[in-house]
Amino acid sequence: MLHWTWSQILSRAASWPALARPGGNLTGLFLDLPELAAKRLELLKEAIPGIARVAVLWDPSMNTVPLRATEVAARSIGVHVQIVEARRPSDFEGAFKAGINGRNRALMVIQSPMLADHPKLIVDLAAKHRLPTTSIFSYFTEAGLLMSYGPNLNDIFRQAAAYVDKILRGARPSELPVQRPTRFELVVNVKAAKAFGLPMPPSLLLRADQVIE
């Protein structure tokens, strides 16, 4: 299967009909889900009652749509967000320190390919600075972050495999709509919560698709 480059994705993202019929020799899975920002912030408010400030780790080389969606969502639920930037792994330490200095009680990762490649480093810094951190991908939570809410990666891989099969059987990529994830999961790491001194609400744990003890 052919994948879109980021420039191709961003040029078409403003026109959702283009995802139904991408044209050319393009198709695949589109993971840019800015609408999840509100849900992730709501989950943080439930996990940390009274939270008013959240740091947002963002790679400034990426499209700003998820960042703007996060800012809008934060205003709608009464949470102040502080953007802390990281272009490379060497920036992570400074970003976490900025989050602590800004009196934020948690940190939310806006995913990028660069950030996605370094779950252990982000987990270690969250523990070091005692800053509960969330991601959209469950493998971050499995590595030790507090919580994740986002697309189910196994489901995405199955969707991709189905497209590969169709193309190998002769389907034209231009006739296959670009898909967005349809299945989402909440994963909570109770061990991490205990390390941060956070008693996770039973109502949150009951809704979780996976609880890591």
Image (tube, rainbow, N blue to C red):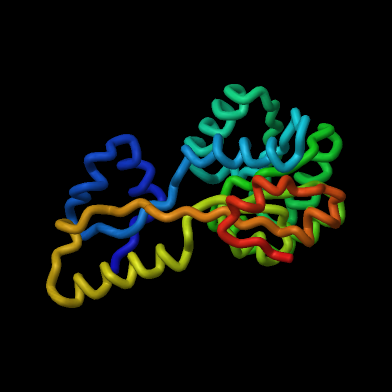
Asked if residue 186 lies left or right of residue 202, the reply is left
Asked if residue 204 lies left or right of residue 65, the reply is right
Residue shown at 55% from the left, 35% from the top: 38
Circle count: 0
Rendered position, 145 above or below 33: below
In this orientation, which residue lies closer to the viewer: 206 or 107? 206
Rendered position, 120 above or below 208: below
In this orientation, which residue lies closer to the viewer: 158 or 12? 158
Residue 74 visible in the current orientation: yes
Residue 114 visible in the current orientation: no
In the rendering, at what x and y percent does residue 196 appear?
84, 51
In the rendering, at what x and y percent does residue 79 appear?
68, 27
Instruction: Check the picture and name the quadrant holding the C terminus.
Output: bottom right
Asked if residue 211 lies left or right of residue 6, the reply is right
In the rendering, at what x and y percent does residue 181 appear?
39, 54
Residue shown at 28% from the left, 39% from the top: 16
In the rendering, at what x and y percent does residue 161 appear?
32, 72
Rendered position, 116 above or below 75: below
Asked if residue 23 lies left or right of residue 127, the reply is left
Residue shown at 74% from the left, 52% from the top: 92
Rendered position, 31 above or below 210: above
Instruction: Check the picture and name the quadrant holding the N terminus.
Output: bottom left
Residue shown at 72% from the left, 54% from the top: 146
In this orientation, which residue lies closer to the viewer: 134 or 11? 134
